[in-house]
């Protein structure tokens, strides 16, 4: 068989013609089939759209939940951060307060340590004071009868011009003169002056507190033999000025007659401590060596002073005295006048007159706190 014959056997069947009834029916059936396919695809597409909408709705809901959760978490984190900041500030404030408290405690410890050191030093000093022989005389008394420390003040009283201070032997006479107040003093037949008597008020110490400390330049030398004072001071100065004896250049050497001890002052402040630590020293005095005791010398500083006004019980201030004659003559006439009992006076212990135009100061010694 030839190839032409083969081709002729494979001819396609022609489509039904639209001009025929069978063709039209076939076309209708064909379009129905296509329509059904299209309807089926549309249903599938609608179902797919619904699925996509559901997924979109689910994703939107999840997104809203996640957004809300993130916002709540952010608010929670923000609140937690604020709380932590407040807590951190509180911790910092507590730390600052603790540091201040630590500084206060350290300062108190330093002060207490300095006080303890001072007390230890004072204790060392008081245990190293010069010895003094005490003999019991057989007298006893109550604890309340013990004597307290007393001072005898030396008060300088500036006097104005035309005044006089009169000290009577008896207090009652001074009171009588003050009570009379105005006094007519007859200086001569044609000269009478009028003076006024006033009380003398002095400011005296009522309470004195003294803080003592060891002087770094001075030493107190005791246990000394009885000998010429000048020779003793010279020997001590020579001995303690030598380096081999632990001393140095001496600035002053002074005897304290009330205690029988010697105060020796060095130019530098590096020798006193070593000498007091050794305490006992052999010094060539007279023709043989003598053991003296060297102890610290205390400097006193007033830490508390209270004063009070006190009226002198036996001294009267006379004012308004004119310059009518010589000082000595007028002073004698005043003394004569106030010695007479007829004028209200009595025995005079002392009288000091300061004329007009002059400056004089009176010294009051041994004034007690109660007058």
Image: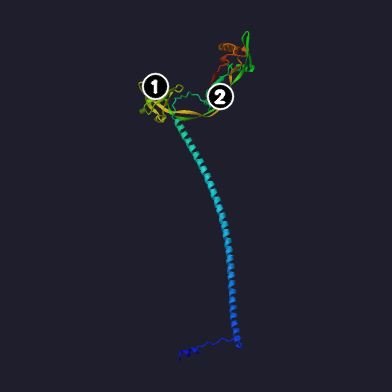
Determine the residue positioned at 47% across, 30% down.
213
Distance from disc 2 to disc 1, alpha carbons, whole Å, reads 40 Å
Residue 37 x, y percent position in the rendering: 58, 79
Name the residue at the top extreme.
189
To which residue does mark 1 refer? Answer: 234
Q: Earlier in the sequence, mark 2 or mark 1?
A: 2
Depicted 142 relative to depicted 169: above or below: below
Residue 68 x, y percent position in the rendering: 59, 61
Secondary structure of residue under mark 2: strand
Determine the residue positioned at 58% across, 70% down.
52
Along the horizontal axis of the image, is 249 left or right of 46? left
Residue 334, picture quadrant = top right
Along the horizontal axis of the image, is 48 left or right of 274? right
Depicted 28 relative to depicted 295: above or below: below
- Check contact, mark 2 vs mark 1: CB within 8 A: no
Residue 118 x, y percent position in the rendering: 47, 33
Determine the residue positioned at 59% across, 65% down.
60
Depicted 53 relative to depicted 313: above or below: below
To which residue does mark 2 refer? Answer: 204
Q: Quadrant of the C terminus?
A: top right
Compare residues 202 and 328 and report the one nearer the observer: 328
Residue 166 seen in the current view: no
Compare residues 117 and 158 and report the one nearer the observer: 158
Residue 293 seen in the current view: yes
Depicted 157 relative to depicted 84: above or below: above
């Amino acid at each position: 068989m030839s190839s032409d014959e083969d081709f002729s056997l494979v001819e396609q069947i022609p489509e039904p013609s639209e001009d025929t009834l069978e063709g039209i029916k076939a076309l209708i059936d064909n379009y129905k089939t296509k329509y059904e396919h299209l309807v089926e695809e549309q249903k599938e597409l609608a179902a797919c759209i619904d699925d996509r909408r559901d997924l979109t709705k689910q994703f939107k809901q999840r997104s809203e939940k996640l957004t809300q959760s993130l916002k709540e978490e952010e608010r929670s984190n923000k609140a937690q951060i604020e709380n932590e900041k407040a807590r951190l500030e509180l911790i910092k404030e507590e730390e600052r307060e603790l540091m201040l408290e630590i500084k206060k405690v350290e300062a108190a410890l330093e002060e207490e340590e300095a006080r303890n050191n001072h007390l230890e030093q004072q204790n060392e000093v008081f245990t190293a004071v010069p010895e003094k022989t005490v003999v019991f005389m057989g007298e006893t008394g109550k604890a309340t009868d013990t004597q307290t420390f007393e001072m005898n003040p030396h008060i300088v009283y500036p006097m104005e011009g035309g005044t006089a201070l009169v000290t009577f032997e008896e207090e009652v006479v001074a009171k009588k003169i003050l009570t009379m107040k105005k006094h007519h003093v007859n200086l001569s037949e044609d000269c009478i002056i009028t003076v006024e008597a006033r009380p003398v008020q002095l400011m005296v110490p009522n309470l004195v507190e003294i803080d003592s400390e060891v002087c770094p330049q001075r030493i107190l030398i005791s246990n000394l033999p009885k000998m010429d004072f000048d020779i003793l001071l010279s020997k001590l100065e020579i001995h303690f000025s030598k380096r081999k004896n632990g001393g140095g250049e001496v600035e002053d050497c002074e005897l304290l007659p009330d205690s029988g001890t010697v105060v020796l002052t060095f130019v530098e402040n590096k020798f006193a401590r070593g000498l007091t630590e050794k305490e006992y020293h052999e010094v060539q005095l007279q023709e043989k060596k003598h053991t003296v005791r060297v102890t610290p010398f205390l400097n006193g500083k007033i830490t508390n002073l209270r004063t009070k006004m006190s009226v002198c019980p036996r001294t009267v201030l006379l004012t308004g005295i004119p310059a009518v004659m010589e000082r000595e003559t007028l002073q004698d006439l005043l003394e004569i006048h106030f010695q007479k009992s007829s004028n209200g006076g009595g025995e005079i212990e002392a009288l000091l007159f300061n004329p007009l135009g002059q400056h004089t100061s009176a010294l009051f010694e041994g004034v007690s706190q109660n007058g």
